[in-house]
Amino acid sequence: MVGVSEPGFDSGAPAPGVSATVVPATVAVVAAAVAVPAAALALLGTVSMAVGVRRGTRRLHTTGGALAFGGVLLSAGAGAPPALALIGGAAAIIAWDAGEHAIGLGGQVGSEAYARRGILAHVGASTIAASTIVVVAAIVFVLARTGNPSAATVVLVFAVGLFALLLDR
């Protein structure tokens, strides 16, 4: 896919893309607030994602997504309740996915295009998929309550992230 290179064309993401990224990323920050370093890492990731989406910079946005997800993983390792860690991990992935979609739209139609409906539809579908994954993971966690729950939480949150990585390919 080739972006438009007209003079004066702003290939940054449309404005709704920034808020569609920041809202779920904020949920990830709140979920990571079990440990201050984890929340700080997730907050740094949220800011990086927002700036990356606004500028249309995938590298900065993806780095921010990894930081936000890392903050949630760190909170899971610090003893966050499993449901909170799963919700935070899913929220970080939804934020990353929303930003990727918005950056792609910006490259195709520019930052001034009306894209609210498309972005909301995409984020809604991603949220439904992520919610389903969280519910299934929570059921697996409840049914397999043996061993170390903190380790299981980290593994489940990591699995959600791995799913997102594979989904992108």
Image (cartoon, rainbow, N blue to C red):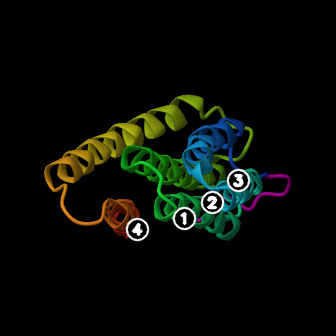
Q: 10 Å neighbourhood of mark 1: few (<14), some, or many (≥20)?
A: many
Foreground mark, 2 or 4, reads: 2
Q: Which of 102 and 79 is in front in this view?
A: 79
Q: Residue at x 58, y 65 (%)?
A: 2
Q: Where is residue 81 in the image (x, y as percent from the top left)?
A: 42, 48
Which region of the structure is painted magenta? Answer: 2-9
Find residue 164 and report its image quarter: bottom left
Q: Return the disc, 1 or 2, that comes first in the chain's sequence.
A: 2
Taking the view exactly as shown, the residue that stands out farthest to the right is 8
Q: Would you name the residue on which mark 4 appears?
A: 165
In the picture, measured across the screen, residue 14 lies left or right of residue 143, that is: right
Residue 116, x across and y down, in percent: 59, 30
> Tag 2, which secondary structure?
helix
Q: Which of marks 1 and 3 is in front?
A: 1
Whether tag 3 and tag 4 are in contact, CB under 8 A, the answer is: no
Q: Nearer the viewer, mark 2 or mark 3?
A: 2
Q: For numbered disc 3, what is the local secondary structure?
A: helix
Q: Residue 74 carries which label?
A: 1
User: Residue drawn 66% across and 70% down?
Assistant: 59
Closer to the N terminus: mark 1 or mark 4?
1
> What residue would you read off at disc 3?
43
How far apart are the two marked residues, 1 and 4, measured between alpha carbons? 19 Å
Q: Are discs 1 and 2 less than 8 Å apart at CB?
A: yes
Which mark, residue 38?
2
- Which mark is in front, 1 or 4? 1
| Residue 37: x %, y % from top left | 68, 62
Neighbour tally class for label 4: few under 14, some 14-19, many 20 plus, Cα within 10 Å = few
Question: Disc 2 or 3, which lies upstream in sequence?
Answer: 2
- Residue 19 place in picture, x, y as percent: 67, 37
Q: Quadrant of the C terminus?
A: bottom left
- For label 4, the SS is helix
